[in-house]
């Protein structure tokens, strides 16, 4: 399995931005579709965004469309989630995840095999 390490979380005021990073190691990064999920206190983990192996296809949950672009660099073995126009309800631990797939263009909202340890994002009002 690929190993994933997230970074970039922190405390930010409403309306602010952060860039979350997820560095992969151990396996060929370009073999994996990638996703970001989040878990708020007292809630279940939820899907946020996903990107295909090639980076050409992306998909977002409705609440973050237009605010949280996802992108990747298969040379740097990194996927990012740019989180903009933050709201207090975006407060959560954000996790990146990897799913090995033969398809270079498919994206996935579930079924991920590898997970990072998470990075905390706290948005103050």
Image (cartoon, rainbow, N blue to C red):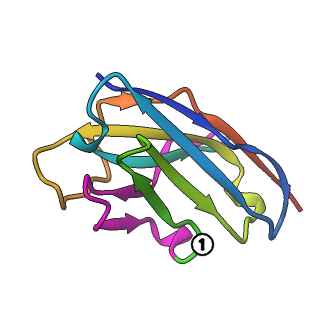
Task: Please provide percent x and percent y for residue 48.
Answer: 48, 56
**Residue 55 forms part of the magenta stretch:** yes
Q: Residue at x 25, y 52 (%)?
A: 53
Helix, strand or loop status at disc 1: loop
Q: Position of residue 57 (x, y in %)?
A: 28, 67
Above or below 91: residue 77 = above
Q: Which residue is mark 1?
A: 67
Look at the picture and state if 38 lies above or below 19: above
- The residue shown at (26%, 39%) is 99
User: Disc count in the image?
Assistant: 1
Which region is colored magenta? 42-65
Q: Residue at x 12, y 53 (%)?
A: 103
Quadrant of residue 86 in the image? bottom right
The answer to whether 68 appears left or right of 34 in the picture is right
Closer to us: 92 or 25: 25
Q: Is residue 77 above or below residue 88?
A: above
């Amino acid at each position: 399995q690929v190993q994933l390490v997230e970074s970039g979380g922190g405390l930010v005021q409403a309306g602010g931005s952060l860039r979350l990073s997820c560095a992969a190691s151990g396996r060929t990064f370009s073999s994996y579709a990638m996703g970001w999920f989040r878990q708020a206190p007292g809630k279940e983990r939820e899907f946020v965004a996903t990107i295909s192996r090639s980076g050409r296809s992306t998909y977002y949950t409705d609440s973050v469309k237009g605010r949280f672009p996802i992108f990747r660099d298969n040379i740097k073995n990194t996927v990012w989630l740019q989180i903009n126009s933050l709201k207090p309800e975006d407060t959560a631990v954000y996790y990146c995840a990897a799913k090995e797939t033969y398809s270079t263009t498919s994206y996935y909202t579930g079924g991920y095999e590898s997970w990072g340890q998470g990075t905390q994002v706290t948005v103050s009002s």
